[in-house]
Image (cartoon, grey):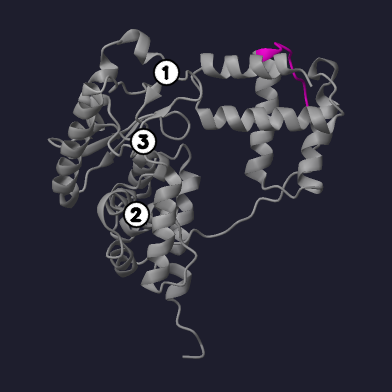
Amino acid sequence: MSQKLLDAVRETIRLKHLSLRTEEAYIYWIRDFILFHNKRHPDHMGEAEIRSFLSHLAQDKSVASSTQNQALNAIIFMYTQVLRKKIGEIGPVIRAHRTKRLPVVFSVNEVRLILSQLNGTPKLVVSLLYGSGLRLLEAIRLRVGDIDFDRNIIVVRRGKGDKDRVAPLPESLKGSLLTQVKKVQAIHEQDCEEGFGEAMLPGSLNIKYPAASRTLGWQFLFPAGRRSSDPRSGKIFRHHLHDSSIQHQVSSAIQRSGITKKGSCHSFRHSFATHLLEKGYDIRTVQDLLGHADVRTTMIYTHVLNRGGISVKSPLD
C-alpha cells in the first residue's frame, strides 16, 4: 500500500481544515478500499472497483447505510481532491439497509430524574443537551465566547455539516455557566503562568488572529483535566473534555434512575425537539434550532408526539 498516498490524503484533509475524526475515518476507509482490492493503487482502479467495494460493505459486512455513505465520501474525496481524477457514474450498488427507528425520547419527569443523578460538569453538559438541543460534541466544543449572557443565546460554531447556528441559553443555567467561566479563567491563568495557555483554534484562525488563542474567549468552556499534545502538530494544548466521559456518566445515571429506555446523550436532544413541538412551536423553528438542513429530518419527532395515532382509544379499553 502506498504510504505516500495516505500521507497526501492527510495533508489535503488538513489543508481543508477538516476535523481529526473525519481524517481518521477517511484514512480508515481508503486503506480498507485498497486492501480489499489486493493493494492495487487507486490510480489503476475506478468506478467498477468502487461499486464492488461498496456492495461488499453492505452484503458481507452488513454496515449501516450511513457507514456505507461515509466510505463512499472518503473514496470520492481521495479521487477528486488528492488524485485529481474524475469519477463517473458508479452504477448500481447493493445498498445498505436504512433502518427506520423512532428516536428514544425521555419524558419531562424522566429528564428531571436523570439530571438529579448527575453533579458538576456532567450535569451542566447534559442540561445543555436538553435545554439547548445541542449534540454532545457541540456542547463539549463550546468556547467561553460562544455564550452570550446578555442575549440569552449560545452560538454553535462548526456544527454538523460545518454550519453555525444559534441555540437558546436556558435562563436557569446562567448562574452555573457563569461559575464555569470563572473556573475556566482560573485554569487558564494557571496554564499561562506555566508557559502554556494557548487554545487550539479552528481552521486558519491562528494565522489570521495569532494573539486570539491566548484570550479567555477562545478557551474551551469544558476543559480537560490535563494538558495534552495535539496529534497533528505536536503542540501542547488544554483540549476539551472527552465525549466518552460524559457518555459514561449519562449511562450510569440512567441506570440509577431505574429508567428502562435505551437512552443516551443524544436522547436529550431528541427530548428537546419533541417537547418543543408538544408545546406548540412550529416545525420550522425547531428545525432551525436543531440545525437540520432538511425539514424531513425534523419531521421524525412528529411521530413520537402524544397525539395522532396513539391518542386513539384501544378497543380493549
Under mark 3, the amino acid is His
Q: Which residue is mark 3?
A: 240
- Secondary structure of the residue carrying numbered label 2: helix
182 in relation to 111, above or below: above
Under mark 1, the amino acid is Gly
- Secondary structure of the residue carrying numbered label 1: loop
Residue that extends furthest to the bottom in the rendered view of this protein: 317
- Secondary structure of the residue carrying numbered label 3: loop
Q: Say whether residue 169 is visible.
A: yes
The question of residue 188 being in magenta is answered with: no
Q: Is residue 46 left or right of residue 177?
A: right
- Which secondary structure is most common in the magenta stretch? loop
* Label drawn at residue 272: 2
Q: Nearer the viewer, residue 168 or 247?
A: 247
Bounds of the magenta segment: 82-91
Quarter where residue 169 is shown:
top left
Q: Which residue is mark 1?
A: 203
* Lower sequence index among marks 1 and 2: 1
The question of residue 90 being in magenta is answered with: yes
201 in relation to 65, above or below: above
- Residue 264 percent across, percent down from the top left: 45, 57
- Residue 85 percent across, percent down from the top left: 74, 13
Under mark 2, the amino acid is Phe
Residue depicted at 37% across the width and 23% down the height: 200
